[in-house]
Image: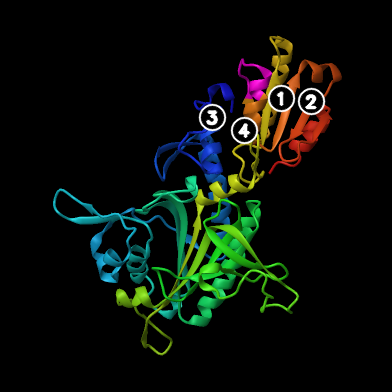
Amino acid sequence: MKQSRLFTKTRKEAPADEVSKNAQLLIRAGYVHKEMAGVYSYLSLGIRVLEKIEKIVREEMNSIGGQEIRMATLHPSEPWKQTGAWDSVDVVFKILSRTEKEYTVGQSEEEIVTPIVQEYALSYKDLPLAVYQIGQKYRDELRAKSGIMRGREFSMKDMYSFHESQEDFDLFYNRAKEAYFRVYERCGLVAKATEASGGSFTKKLSYEFMVLTDAGEDDILYCDTCSYCANVEITKENEGDACTRCDGSGKLMRAKASEVGNIFDLGTKYTNDFNFTYKDKEGNEKYPIMGCFGIGITRLMGVSVEAFSDEKGIVWPESIAPFRIHLVELSGGDTELKDEADGLYNTLKEAGVEVLYDDRDVRAGEKFNDSDLLGLPHRIVVSKKTKEEGKFEVVERKTGEVAFLTEEELYQKFLNRNE
């Protein structure tokens, strides 16, 4: 894409009412537009990041047998009243229509997905079953904060599984847990699975996936040796205590973290509420065990900015960057040099390499500042200096490492390793 055609522009200053790093940088770089507290529109560049994250999540959910669906956003109040959530869940938006009917917009989908699956899962032969969607969620947060990491409208992957037994659920949970870790790893993040309260969903213990960040809303204790991790709110352990989950060599460390996913064992709460039964092998009616698996898509984007940024701007991991390469043309009016930059852009684009081409007629300093702010993984500079040397300047955004490559070396680097 040519940057001269990109309708968004960068801005030097962050909005005065934004204190979180992710919101400041994403707004300055033109990835998002703030509508009000906790509600953001995602612009051309922002959509590309979200689509990359969604693709990773979709692939990993499909790999464990998840089937993608798309559920209604506008919900009738009746199923919510049937489960008791209409009155017990305080973050539900409630809408009264002109005909005096009550509705809500989805903040979770147990009330919708359970009756859907109930129509089709009639026998033990239909289980286990897992369905998921990626879409918008709405929660009436009293105090939206942390930019796009905690809002009133956000994008989420929510998956719901149905099982014959607790043992089968536990087996699926372990597969989902590994898939979750693969999602975060592919996004360039390191996450920890923490024990936490089930909150309004269930009284059972749930698991949250946390990424360590100073912008996090949770305090966790984690072992510096093994994988044990727990939310401070539900544990009696303290920082500095010896870890009881490993051989005793580990010590508990305290850190701020942000939740990027969760798993709830819902038991038979919702299947009971809707009188959802299936016939087992003996022909007996039984209630399926149900699980809920969430990953915050927009939250992952925000956490990534918190984790991967510096004083100059965002530093996107290659796997979720909106473009792989930022091609910067510094022709200074030299038509031959401009033609060379255009030719390189076309060659890379035709080879399937994602390129943002800064062809704007602005000063070099402005182009470099914008490039740092946007945070694409690789910057290729075409200038009089590089032309004289017969090479292209390639700058790695993450490390700042600079290399001068011939045209052949450039193509070998980016065309033969297209990801």
Q: Which residue is mark 1?
A: 344
Q: Nearer the viewer, mark 1 or mark 4?
A: 4
Tell me if label 1 and label 3 are in contact, CB under 8 Å.
no
Q: Which residue is mark 3?
A: 13
Residue 88 rendering spot, x and y as whole percentages: 30, 67
Q: Which residue is mark 4?
A: 373
Neighbour class for label 3 at 10 Å: few (<14), some, many (≥20)? few
Residue drawn at (58%, 52%) of the image: 56
Tell me if label 1 and label 2 are in contact, CB under 8 Å.
yes
The kind of residue tagged 2 is Phe
SS class of the residue under badge 4? helix
- Furthest toward the bottom, the residue is 282
Q: Write down the region rendered in magenta.
A: 358-367
Quarter of the picture holding the N terminus = top right
Q: What's the distance in space between the residues labelled 3 and 2, CA to CA?
A: 32 Å
Q: Is residue 346 visible?
A: no
